């Protein structure tokens, strides 16, 4: 089975909707193989699911990020997530309603491996990727 990885992270309220971090993650994933139970996994453009790319193609306005209704975005994201075997979380995902929903969906499926990027304190850039331990997440009402 071919592995597919979904990138989850905050968009709303971030400068330019966090677009740079999503594309940095794609670049990092294509450059760094993942070792899962001793098996080397290499990700390519065809096996990396970047919801930011789809949001941009759907008309996301990077200046304010509010042009596409949240329910439309998250429903499309969850459909994409359902095609994946892995999910990786960008920095700050815990404070994102959408990423929290994606986390809960991945966790409840029981079939998706969850990863989190580790960032270098010195550069602020992705340093490594580690398996995300199962954690309890609560959704705060807005």
Image (cartoon, helix red, strand yellow):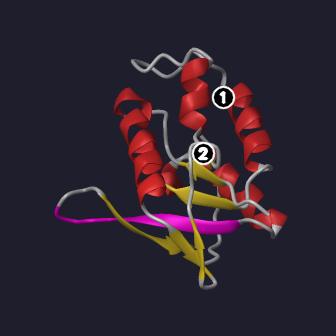
In this image, 142 relative to 102: left or right?
Answer: left
**Residue behind mark 2:** 97
- The answer to if 115 sits in the magenta stretch is yes
Front residue of 123 and 35? 35
Kindly identify the residue that appears in the image at 49 percent across and 66 percent down: 33
**Foreground of the two, 16 or 48:** 48
Region of the chain picked out in magenta, as a range: 113-122
Q: Position of residue 55 (x, y in %)?
A: 59, 26
Residue at image location 83% in from the left, 63% down from the top:
109
Mark closest to the chain's N terminus, 1 or 2: 1
* Circles 1 and 2: CB atoms closer than 8 Å: yes
Q: Residue at x 74, y 33 (%)?
A: 76
- Secondary element at image label 1: helix
The dominant secondary structure in magenta is strand
In the rendered image, residue 27 lying in the magenta stretch gets the answer no
Residue 101 vertical position relative to residue 33 in the rendered view, above or below: above
Q: From where the camera sits, is residue 92 visible?
A: no
Q: Which residue in the protein does label 1 denote? A: 70
Quadrant location of residue 119?
Answer: bottom left
Residue 54 percent across, percent down from the top left: 61, 28
Q: Residues within 10 Å of mark 1 (few under 14, many from 20)?
A: some
The percent coordinates of residue 27 (x first, y second) are 41, 48
* Label 2 CA crowd tier, 10 Å (few <14, some 14–19, many 20+): many
Residue 15 appears anywhere in the view: yes
Left or right: residue 31 compared with residue 1: left
Task: From this view, report whether residue 99 is shown above or below residue 2.
Answer: above
């Amino acid at each position: 089975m071919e592995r597919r990885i979904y990138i989850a992270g905050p968009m709303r309220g971030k400068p330019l909707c966090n677009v740079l971090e999503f594309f940095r993650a794609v670049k990092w994933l294509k450059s760094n193989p993942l070792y899962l139970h001793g098996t080397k996994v290499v990700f390519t453009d065809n096996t990396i699911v970047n919801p930011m790319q789809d949001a941009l193609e759907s008309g996301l306005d990077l200046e304010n990020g509010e042009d596409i209704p949240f329910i439309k975005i998250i429903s499309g994201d969850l459909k994409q997530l359902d095609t994946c075997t892995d999910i990786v979380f960008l920095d700050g995902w815990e404070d994102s309603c959408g990423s929290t929903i994606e986390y809960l969906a991945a966790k409840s499926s029981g079939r998706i491996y969850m990863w989190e990027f580790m960032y270098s304190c010195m550069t602020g850039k992705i340093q490594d990727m580690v398996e995300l331990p199962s954690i309890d997440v609560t959704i705060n009402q807005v």
